[in-house]
Amino acid sequence: GQMASVEAHPEETAADERELTVEQLAFETGMSVRNIRNHQSRGLLPPPEVRARIGYYGRRHVERLRLIQEMQAEGLKLSAIKRLIGEYGSNAERFADLRAALKTPLPAEAPEVLSIAELNERFGVEDPKLTAKAEKLGLLVDLGDGRYEAPSPALLRAAEEVQGMGIDLAAAVNVMAKLQRNSRSSARAFVELFLNELWEPFDDAGRPEDGWAEITESVQRLRPLGVEALVALFRLDLSAEIERGFGEVLERSK
């Protein structure tokens, strides 16, 4: 990693009011003073402003520590975080924007919360094994006290319709597991394309200032594009498979 120039953005310094002691910063972020000092010695946190031998921290320090906490919660090691946000986090603000773009949900349906009773009533089955499998697939998230969240109500509706056709729910859930494996490898391939073709050249070039906006915009386009591409391909394949599958059945029944 290149040593980043620590530039205090003039417009930010004014709003930054560095008035927190290290103890207050620890209280504000729920971190130990020792951890804060460690982040500082690792170059993850800009130094405080020292007045009368006391270091004062500001809003940007709070935001930086929150960003580090979030990234750690997602399983990133500190060495990786340092690589991503640069020495003293010169890239941290831009990285925070990039993360915001990554987190922007697709204009999708809102998750639905159901009680176990509602679930059983909708599907007419009380099968803990099936519920556990649906959880493993991420179709349901256990919220505790007998309530579940369906992150994608559309998937639940699809399961209901399939069941309404007289298809066994357990068989349908097994097919969903197969679909999910394929879908995950498709998603991975799509993201790798972005990382190899866009992020790596940008990273190798030292993450030039004028490239950030473009990278952030690409990340925002990544999801809708991936969904469109996959749906388009699946539609073609599904038509071909229906023709093939039913063609064989009809051939045999002559």
Image (cartoon, rainbow, N blue to C red):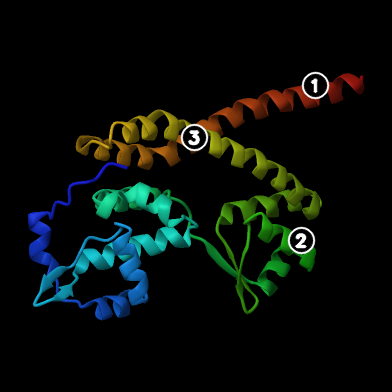
Disc 1 residue crowd, few under 14, some 14–19, many 20+, Cα 10 Å: few
Vertical comparison of 212 with 52: above or below: above
Label 1: element kind: helix
Q: Give me the C-alpha separation between circle 3 and circle 1.
A: 37 Å
Label 3: element kind: helix
Displayed quadrant of residue 223: top left
Labels 3 and 2 touching (C-beta < 8 A):
no
Depth check, front residue: 125 or 9: 9
Labels 3 and 1 touching (C-beta < 8 A):
no
Q: Earlier in the sequence, mark 3 or mark 1?
A: 3
Q: Is residue 151 left or right of residue 13?
A: right
Q: Amino acid type of disc 3?
A: Glu
In the picture, the disc for residue 247 is 1
Q: Is residue 174 left or right of residue 49?
A: right
Image point (26%, 48%), residue name: 91
Disc 3 residue crowd, few under 14, some 14–19, many 20+, Cα 10 Å: few
Residue position for label 3? 192
Q: Give me the C-alpha separation between circle 3 and circle 2.
A: 33 Å
